[in-house]
Image (cartoon, grey):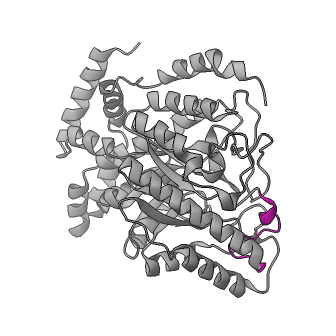
């Protein structure tokens, strides 16, 4: 059980310590509370979806490892899991849906035939619980993606199939945004690429540009829909060339007024992703952030509070760009309790943004402008030992959410009472 007196006492001490650096912890909490994390539905069921009874992940450069029991097998189970996750997180969250998670009623509905009616129950569920919705076309795990190309395919029939799918995805997302009174992000990621060195990269990229031009021909109100484009460094089966590279989508977004999706696991392991934020924001309308953790070649490990995610949050806050960045999670781990993975990753991301909001940026900026680099470095190091954990615990307790590691017991209880009844994989 939470000891509120100890939490409040620790927060009072933390507030006083931060005040010495002209940092208002109450204001930091208020700003943190305005950040809605978009929880990714695919962590709950290992990217299986609900297209038809024998749905399973296949192809597209995506691989889920592990067989921990308790995977969500139905829409009802996934919603139950998401509600449990939200109950263990402070703040209001969103849910990011892929097109294969529609409420298809057990019927086979091909991707170029999906409509708002297949997601109406999700809209109703989100409105009831105050959970905003985001969306993604699903351009993988389909016979028309088996050769590794979708929107950039040289086969006109296949290319038109995927154009129609993405076009319909935008319509669904726009309706979600209209119904919820909050714009929905429709994030486009395609697996298109080549395992070995290709000769004709140019044509595939020209075809992708033409496909996107056609998809975006229909306009929707910005208060309903945000279009986002997600590049990738490589994937399984596309090690030598990815058609939709970071450079391709950055150029397209800058020219056409779209968001760029920065997935933190989609860059070279030696790149500092946070360093890209201030550059990208100079040229695009905004950023859709997919927070994940890269480990060697695998891009989708559970997020932890490491230097990379802290720098990412710091650069967004320093740029005063919270209103131009939508924050989502993107990882999947079937080797541990899936609910626990959600909560660990979400709390780590929130804590990173809290640390950024607790930074004495104005003092640091003054040091920098005056050439006091020793003082700047010393203060940055000192801030690492500041009691940001006490501030986050207070934020949790104020919203009647378990503080510290107390949520672990809640996850264990849910596993025993709910997940265990679902059996193994």
In the image, residue 213 sits, relative to residue 105, either above or below, namely below
Q: Quadrant of residue 389?
A: top left
Q: Nearer the viewer, residue 209 or 52?
A: 52
Q: Say left or right for 418 vs 64.
A: left
Q: Position of residue 169 (x, y in %)?
A: 57, 60
Residue 87: tell me if it is visible: yes
Q: Say left or right for 23 vs 219.
A: left
In the image, residue 346 sits, relative to residue 248, either above or below, namely above
In the image, residue 401 sits, relative to residue 114, either above or below, namely above
Instruction: Give the magenta part as a residue range.
Output: 142-155
Q: Say left or right for 144 vs 5.
A: right
| Magenta span includes 151 | yes
Q: Quadrant of the N terminus?
A: top left
Q: Quadrant of the C terminus?
A: top right
Identify which residue is drawn at 64% across, 50% down.
Answer: 300
Residue 289: tell me if it is visible: no
Q: Nearer the viewer, residue 176 or 406?
A: 176
Identify which residue is drawn at 64% across, 68% down.
Answer: 164
Q: Position of residue 192 (x, y in %)?
A: 72, 70
Q: Position of residue 48 (x, y in %)?
A: 72, 44
Q: Say left or right for 15 vs 237.
A: left
Q: Nearer the viewer, residue 140 or 326?
A: 140
Magenta-colored segment: predominant secondary structure: loop
Q: Position of residue 343 (x, y in %)?
A: 52, 34
Identify which residue is drawn at 33% across, 52% down.
Answer: 380
């Amino acid at each position: 059980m939470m000891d509120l007196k100890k939490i409040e006492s620790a927060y009072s001490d933390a507030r006083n310590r931060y005040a010495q650096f002209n940092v208002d912890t109450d204001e930091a909490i208020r700003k943190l509370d305005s950040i809605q994390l978009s929880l990714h539905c695919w962590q709950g069921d290992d990217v299986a979806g609900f297209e038809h009874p024998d749905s399973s992940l296949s192809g597209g450069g995506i691989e889920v490892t592990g067989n921990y029991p308790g995977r969500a097998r139905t829409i009802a189970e996934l919603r139950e899991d998401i509600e449990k996750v939200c109950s263990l997180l402070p703040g209001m969250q969103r849910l990011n849906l892929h097109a294969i998670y529609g409420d298809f009623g057990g019927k086979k509905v091909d991707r170029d035939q999906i409509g708002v009616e297949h997601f109406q129950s999700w809209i109703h569920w989100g409105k009831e619980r105050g959970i905003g919705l985001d969306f993604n076309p699903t351009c993988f795990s389909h016979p028309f993606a088996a050769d590794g190309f979708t929107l950039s395919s040289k086969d006109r029939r296949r290319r038109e199939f995927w154009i129609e799918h993405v076009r319909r995805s935008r319509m669904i997302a726009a309706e979600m945004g209209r119904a919820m009174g909050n714009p929905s992000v429709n994030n486009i990621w395609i697996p298109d690429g080549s395992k070995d060195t290709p000769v004709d990269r140019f044509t595939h990229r020209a075809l992708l540009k033409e496909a996107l031009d056609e998809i975006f021909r229909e306009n929707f109100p910005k208060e309903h829909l945000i279009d986002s484009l997600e590049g990738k460094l490589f994937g399984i089966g596309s090690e030598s060339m990815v058609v939709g590279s970071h450079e391709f989508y950055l150029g397209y977004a800058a020219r056409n007024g779209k968001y760029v999706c920065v997935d933190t696991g989609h860059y070279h392991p030696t790149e500092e992703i946070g360093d890209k934020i201030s550059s990208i924001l100079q040229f695009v309308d905004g950023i859709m952030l997919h927070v994940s953790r890269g480990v060697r070649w695998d891009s989708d490990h559970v997020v932890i509070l490491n230097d990379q995610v802290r720098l990412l949050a710091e650069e967004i806050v320093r740029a005063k760009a919270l209103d131009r960045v939508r924050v989502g999670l993107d990882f999947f781990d079937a080797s541990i309790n899936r609910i626990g993975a959600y909560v660990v990753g979400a709390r780590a991301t929130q804590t990173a943004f809290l640390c950024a909001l607790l930074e004495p940026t104005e003092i640091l900026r003054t040091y920098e402008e005056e050439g006091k680099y020793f003082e700047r470095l010393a203060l940055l190091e000192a801030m690492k030992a500041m009691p940001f954990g006490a501030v986050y615990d207070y934020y949790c307790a104020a919203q009647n959410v378990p503080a510290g590691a107390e949520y672990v017991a809640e996850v264990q209880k849910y596993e025993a009472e709910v997940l265990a009844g679902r059996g193994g994989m």
